[in-house]
Amino acid sequence: MTDNRPGYDDTPLIPGSNYKVHDKNRPQPRVVTPGTESTQDKAGQAPSDAVVLFDGADLSSWTGRAGPAQWKVQDGYMEVVPGTGNIKTRRHFGDCQLHIEWAAPGVVKGESQGRGNSGVFLMGIYEVQVLDCFNNPTYADGLTAALYGQCPPLVNACRNPGLWQTYDLIWLGPRFEGEKLVRPARITVLHNGIVAHHDKELICPTTHRAVQPYQSHAEIGPLALQDHGDLVRYRNIWYRPMTDYDQAVN
């Protein structure tokens, strides 16, 4: 039988690889159907292999500080209900591609850290700041898309308050051997399609007005969203795992 697969079998091995240059036997990447873009009026669709954490319908995939999540859901988004506390996903996961959309309140109140404040916490520990920094100065490592308390974003890419904004993250969590840190966490953040951090190393977990060393923890954890007392909205939250495991936690 004639082998009509495209490629070659008489080329040299690629250094550090088990495959030859243009190897016809090299496995093909799996097919993923891309999602659709969001607009200001409507959330887009997630890629075909994504795990959807919030689709605009309900908060069944989330928990609050004392049971079910108490944030408001309407018109395809969830909104912080001040005083009810942070919410987190029932599902725990680690290294991933994460997409999340958020909007600061359209009615501007407060200044600096008191305007449209919330946060996206990877593994419930490491925060990417959510804040209305459109014509709103604040300390640099607390700016929108900052790795809070550690590193300012490369740019301030904020849209006007009330408009939907996007975070697209590539997250690589820390690794430990026993209590020893062997790989710090790293993150890439695109804010409204603009690079805010590229493969940035996190020096420690998120704290306020302090620096706290890494402490050993599991390779998976929940995604958490912060109740900071402002009416921040979220929609269209999904992730694509970059490891072979995650788990739902009741």
Image (cartoon, helix red, strand yellow):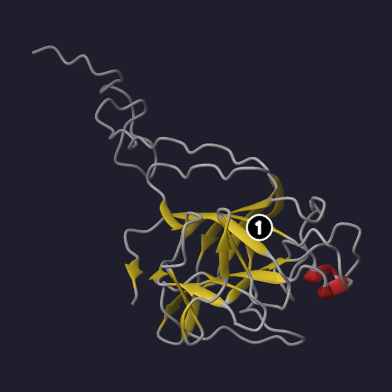
- Which residue: 74% across, 76% down? 149
Residue 166 vertical position relative to residue 112 in the rendered view, above or below: above
Q: Which residue is mark 1?
A: 102
**Image location of residue 249, percent across then percent down:** 34, 75
Seen in the image, is 48 located left or right of residue 154?
left
- Which residue: 45% across, 87% down? 179
Q: Between residue 31 and residue 15, name the one nearer to us.
A: 31
Farthest residue, direction left: 1
Q: Between residue 233 and residue 210, name the one nearer to us.
A: 233
**Image location of residue 97, percent across then percent down:** 50, 53
Find numbered disc 1 in the image and state the secondary structure of the residue it sits on. Answer: strand
The quarter of the picture where residue 143 lies is bottom right
Residue 132 appears in the picture as rendered: yes
- Which residue: 41% across, 73% down? 219
Q: Between residue 91 and residue 186, name the one nearer to us.
A: 91
**Image location of residue 195, percent across then percent down:** 70, 49
Q: Between residue 131 and residue 198, name the one nearer to us.
A: 131
